Image (cartoon, rainbow, N blue to C red):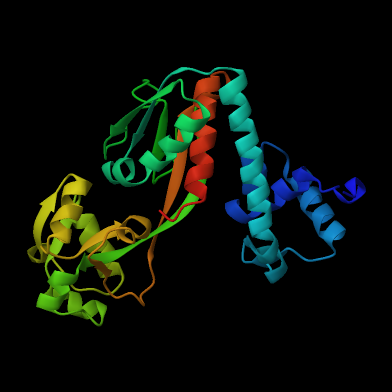
């Protein structure tokens, strides 16, 4: 092997990846804990080394060029390999053990997290996980949980938050329901359909109306505060409901309503408290979840 050819600078690659995922040099610098000029020099050095332009400016944001997009999968693979090395070393050499409590929505807890815990069990078999499946926001500062998965960034200065995914959701209904009631061809057609509500009905209606639909509380014919129950009601043909695309895509018998419409986007934040810097156990689980959630369609 020609070892002289293996001279890739991971810091430069990491600066490029963080800029892509955070959307700007300033946000990427904050995420990596470096100054913006330092991060900008790392990105420029990578462009010079590869002799390509990796970003173009769109408004206040940076968007990867075709060359940058082509490089992206390779750099993500480097990140994943580095994380696996770190996690494996931590799990085996330090014999990390004890409990970590994770709070997430009931849908996330049931449909997404079990696969992540399979990976964790293989890496750190002595770590015990307690999943708090709750749709309210648990207080990390009061130690109701060690790690939270949220869709809004917390404001408390004592918390550490990382944006790990920009997920999408859409309207879904069972094939049986759509065969019986017809498949909407436009947002206006939704006014003739039943909906399964979840949590705040007003927010559901507001979101749909903002996209041009004309529905009201009269359209919400069934609902539950529990997301799993709402999804099961929709799966049984009681109406249309919102669901994350990653979950819906793995549920047989469910179809996307108005599949050509723009999806609804929502962020996925991984949050913990400052103890992350001193607890190897929490750091291990946090890093694994960050990699796992970043690589999945949620």
Residue that extends furthest to the front in the rendered view of this protein: 1
Residue in the image at 33% along x and 44% along y: 108
- Residues 88 and 220: in front is 88
Relative to 7, does residue 289 appear above or below in the rendering?
above
Q: Position of residue 258 (x, y in %)?
A: 29, 75
Answer with the quarter of the image where residue 54 lies. Answer: bottom right
x and y percent of residue 93 in the render? 62, 19
Q: Is residue 13 above or below residue 289?
A: below
Please provide percent x and percent y for residue 187: 25, 77
Q: Nearer the viewer, residue 221 or 100?
A: 100
Q: Nearer the viewer, residue 174 or 104?
A: 174
148 on left or right of 292: left
Image side of residue 17 versus residue 263, left or right: right
Q: How many marks?
A: 0
Residue 138 located left or right of residue 189: right
Residue shown at 58% from the left, 22% from the top: 92
Picture layout, residue 191 above or below residue 21: below
Image-based side of 256 in relation to 115, left or right: left
How far across and how far down the image is residue 119, in percent? 47, 37
Residue located 13% across and 56% down the image: 233
Res 51 → quadrant: bottom right
- Is residue 203 or residue 93 the one in the foreground? 93
Which residue does the image show at 22% across and 65% down from the upper left? 253
| Residue 23 in view (yes/no) | no
**Residue at the extreme bottom:** 185
Q: Is residue 262 visible?
A: yes
């Amino acid at each position: 092997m020609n070892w002289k050819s293996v001279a890739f600078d991971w810091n430069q690659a990491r600066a490029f990846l963080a800029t892509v995922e955070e959307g700007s040099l300033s946000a990427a610098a904050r995420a990596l804990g470096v100054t913006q000029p330092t991060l900008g020099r790392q990105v420029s050095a990578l462009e010079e080394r590869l002799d390509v332009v990796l970003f173009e400016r769109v408004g206040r944001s940076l968007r990867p060029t075709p060359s940058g997009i082509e490089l992206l999968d390779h750099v993500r693979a480097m990140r994943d390999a580095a994380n696996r090395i770190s996690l494996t070393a931590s799990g085996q050499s330090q014999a990390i053990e004890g409990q970590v409590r994770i709070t997430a929505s009931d849908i996330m807890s049931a449909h997404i997290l079990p696969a992540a815990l399979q990976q964790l069990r293989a890496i750190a078999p002595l770590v015990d996980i307690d999943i708090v499946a709750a749709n309210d926001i648990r207080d990390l500062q009061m130690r109701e949980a060690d790690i939270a998965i949220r869709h809004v960034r917390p404001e408390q200065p004592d918390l550490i938050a990382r944006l790990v995914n920009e997920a999408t959701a859409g309207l879904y209904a069972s094939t049986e329901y759509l065969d019986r009631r017809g498949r909407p061809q436009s947002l206006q057609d939704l006014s003739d359909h039943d909906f399964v509500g979840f949590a705040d009905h007003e927010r559901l209606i507001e979101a749909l109306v903002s996209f041009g639909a004309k529905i009201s509380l009269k359209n919400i014919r069934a609902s539950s505060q529990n997301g799993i129950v709402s999804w099961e009601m929709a799966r049984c043909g009681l109406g249309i409901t919102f669901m994350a695309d990653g979950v819906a895509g793995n549920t047989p018998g469910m179809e996307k309503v108005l599949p050509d419409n723009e999806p609804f986007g929502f962020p996925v934040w991984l949050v913990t408290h400052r103890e992350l810097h001193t607890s190897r156990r929490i750091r291990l689980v946090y890093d694994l979840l960050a990699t796992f959630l970043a690589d999945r369609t949620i």
